[in-house]
């Protein structure tokens, strides 16, 4: 048996297509890392507002008359956009200035133009103009001015809602508003405590933005009375991501920074799984059909081995190829990622948030990669076995390669459609079960009443069915006319 497996591996490694696939893998890994780093570098190199956009708004404004009742609303809107664009064109799109212009100054500019051209209220205009002048002065080097001003406004709103709640303590809408405001207050306080400016120029600023976004999305789901399983899964995903970014912020770490060697390595299996699948399918899809099409099956079957042993040796060789491909990708990512981003971050652990215990979990990066590989293993085994079975049953290599690839590519869409329409019966199909990573760290499966044991059982059943069909067909295959 060992000799058979060794011979099959030698055949696979001796093929020109194997060398081509290895080169493709190398090019893809290099390309991914270089482009990922380049994308991070060029992000934010553009102005928040281009000169062409400013010119466009100026032309639009010329066509409108502020004294014409039919034009005045459009004039105010266009004038406000133009004033914001002129103010923001000096800054890059990821600067804290561009961020506060949109969040805080743009509404004030709208008020100025509203009081000036629509309501024509000089007293209110002077008050808002004074506020605007203070903001523009702070725009040069004082982002904390805006944070403190925002914090003051949030405290005032919270006090008002608390007073309203005293007279109507059963009002869910007020409670939800209060919860949202308290969270926004927490974000501002955290920003001030950790000295993290607005915008996204630094990783810490990006982490703050992401924390606020994911937690806001989570709170939106949490405030709903009835949510579906799909929404619950999405809600938990938001909560996990929010807590991971919060951990980085509070501990001055960069575990979730995508522009690090550590992050790219820990996500390498998920990033390159399509390539691993393609390699497995191509190898398995031609394993049997090629022997019959070339007539070499006769030379193989005259050896003193049963047909079952011969078939199993070929399938085991496919799985060994899968392991070799995965190890090659991880090794290439380890080396190339280190050269592109620097090797220092490899000393960092992997950090995850466990929903079951509501706590942060840290793991060695290679232990984490092993865990992810084990969780993705059913996908690789089943897709490889499917290609192998089709190759055995049909002796048609293109069919044996194409169908598994299309099936894998469409599996996510099948799952989403099933969840959307509530097709719970699809949980007995293989695609909702073959990714065991959905159960990691307290994750929520696609459908109710699914568990790790259930998913493993379903995957095992499909594997056995395909294997048995392959063995029976191969044993009964007539080779006289080959």
Image: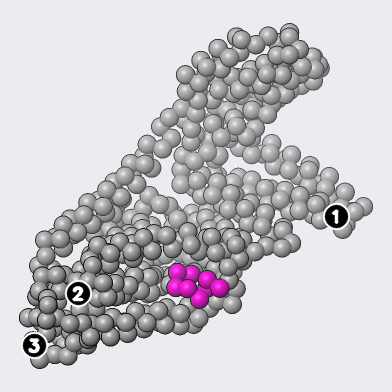
Whether residue 387 is in magenta: the answer is no
Label 2 sits on residue: 288
| Residue extending farthest front | 481
Quadrant location, the C terminus = bottom left
Q: Magenta segment: does it hold 431?
A: yes
Mark 1 → mark 2, Cα distance in angstroms: 69 Å
Mark 1, other Cα within 10 Å: few <14 / some 14–19 / many ≥20: few
Residue 130 image point, x, y percent: 71, 21
**Residue identifier under label 1:** 171
Residue 320 seen in this snapshot: no
Nearer to the camera, 26 or 45: 26
Q: How is the image coloured?
A: one colour
Instruction: Name the residue located 76 percent from the left edge and 21 percent from the top edge.
Output: 127
Q: Quadrant of residue 157?
A: top right
On the image, the x and y values in percent for residue 146 come to 64, 35
- What label sits on residue 303 in the rendered view? 3
Determine whether the residue tagged by mark 3 lies in a helix, strand or loop.
loop
Specify the quadrant of the image occupied by residue 401: bottom left
Pointer 2 with pointer 3, Cβ within 8 A: no
What stretch of residues is rendered in magenta? Answer: 425-432
Q: Are marks 1 and 2 in contact (CB under 8 Å)?
A: no
Residue at position x 38%, y 49% from top?
259
Q: Label 3 neighbourhood size at 10 Å, few (<14), some (14-19), many (20+)?
A: few
The x, y position of residue 9, in whole percent, is 15, 74
């Amino acid at each position: 048996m060992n000799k058979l497996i060794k011979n099959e591996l030698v055949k696979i490694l001796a093929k020109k297509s194997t060398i081509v696939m290895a080169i493709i893998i190398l090019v893809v890994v290099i390309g991914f890392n270089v482009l990922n780093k380049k994308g991070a570098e060029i992000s934010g190199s553009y102005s928040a507002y281009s000169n062409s956009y400013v010119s466009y708004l100026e032309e639009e404004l010329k066509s409108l008359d502020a004294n014409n009742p039919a034009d005045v609303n459009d004039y105010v809107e266009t004038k406000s956009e133009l004033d914001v664009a002129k103010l923001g064109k000096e800054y890059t799109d990821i600067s804290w200035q561009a961020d506060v212009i949109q969040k805080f100054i743009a509404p004030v500019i709208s008020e100025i133009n509203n009081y000036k051209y629509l309501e024509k209220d000089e007293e209110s205009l002077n008050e808002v103009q004074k506020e605007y002048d203070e903001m523009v002065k702070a725009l040069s080097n004082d982002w904390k001015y805006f944070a403190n001003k925002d914090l003051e406004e949030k405290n005032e709103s919270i006090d008002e809602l608390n007073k309203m709640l005293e007279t109507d303590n059963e009002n869910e809408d007020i409670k939800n508003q209060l919860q949202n405001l308290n969270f926004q207050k927490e974000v501002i306080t955290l920003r001030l405590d950790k000295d993290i400016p607005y915008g996204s120029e630094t990783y810490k600023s990006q982490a703050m933005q992401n924390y606020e976004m994911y937690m806001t999305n989570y709170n939106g789901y949490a405030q709903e009375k009835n949510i579906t399983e799909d929404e619950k899964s999405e809600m938990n995903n938001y909560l996990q991501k929010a807590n991971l970014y919060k951990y980085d912020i509070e501990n001055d770490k960069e575990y979730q920074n995508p522009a690090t060697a550590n992050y790219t390595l820990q996500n390498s299996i998920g990033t390159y799984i399509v390539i691993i699948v393609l390699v497995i399918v191509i190898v398995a899809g031609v394993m049997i059909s090629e022997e019959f099409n070339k007539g070499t099956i006769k030379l193989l079957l005259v050896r003193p081995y049963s047909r079952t042993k011969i078939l199993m040796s070929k399938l085991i060789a496919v799985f060994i190829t899968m392991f070799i491909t995965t190890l090659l990708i991880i090794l290439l990512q380890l080396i190339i990622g280190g050269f592109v981003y620097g090797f220092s971050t490899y000393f960092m652990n992997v950090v995850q948030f466990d929903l079951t215990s509501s706590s942060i979990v840290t793991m060695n990066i290679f232990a984490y990669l092993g865990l992810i590989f084990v969780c993705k293993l059913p996908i690789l085994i089943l897709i490889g076995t499917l290609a192998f079975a089709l190759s055995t049953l049909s002796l048609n290599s293109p069919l044996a390669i194409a169908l598994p690839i299309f099936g894998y590519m469409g599996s996510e869409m099948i799952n989403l459609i099933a969840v959307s329409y509530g097709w719970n019966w699809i949980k007995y199909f293989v695609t909702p079960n073959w990714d065991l990573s959905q159960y990691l760290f307290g994750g929520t499966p696609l459908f109710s009443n699914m568990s790790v044991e259930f998913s493993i059982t379903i995957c095992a059943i499909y594997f056995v069915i395909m294997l048995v069909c392959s063995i029976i067909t191969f044993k009964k295959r007539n080779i006289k006319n080959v």
